[in-house]
Image (cartoon, rainbow, N blue to C red):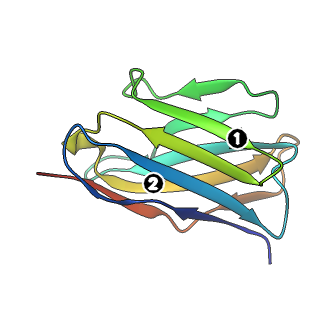
Amino acid sequence: QAEVVESGGGLVQPGGSLRLSCAAAGFTFNGHIVNWYRQTPGKERELVALVTTSNYKQYGDFVKGRFSISRDDAKNMVTLQMDNLKPEDTGVYYCYSIHRMGAPSFWGQGTQVTVSS
């Protein structure tokens, strides 16, 4: 069964860092645009970052240079390095992979990120 699996969430103090990973299982990221979304309390799910097959990267406006997305297709892995975390970054972070032709696509189960002192 093909799926994506997130890991790396947790509790961190404001100003701290976390590294989230998204692994492909049962398929490869080749040809896929891989996205990180988040659901924060009281807000709709929003795009955090994406990386395309040509390594083009895009970030949500709120990132402001604090996060960095990278992909390693040989390892079937996409990582999201998050630095200078703020309490408003608290939420569930989801990996979403979609083939550039529009299908197939996969949502992960999400990983909780909590930024609190």
Image-based side of 7 in relation to 16, left or right: right
Give the Cα separation between the discs numbered 1 and 2: 17 Å
**Could you tell me residue 98's position as x and y percent?**
75, 49
- Type of amino acid at the residue the image marks with label 1: Arg
- Type of amino acid at the residue the image marks with label 2: Tyr
Total residue callouts: 2
Q: Residue furthest bottom?
A: 1
Mark 2 = which residue?
A: 93
**Could you tell me residue 75's position as x and y percent?**
77, 54
Write the residue at 81% across / 46% down: 73
Characterize the local packing of mark 2: few (<14), some (14-19) or many (20 or more) Cα atoms within 10 angstroms.
many
Write the residue at 20% across / 44% down: 87
Q: Quadrant of residue 53?
A: top right
Mark 1 = which residue?
A: 71
Q: Residue furthest left?
A: 117
Q: Is residue 93 above or below residue 53?
A: below
**Dot 2 lies on which element?**
strand
| Quarter of the image that includes the N terminus | bottom right
**Could you tell me residue 36's position as x and y percent?**
55, 45
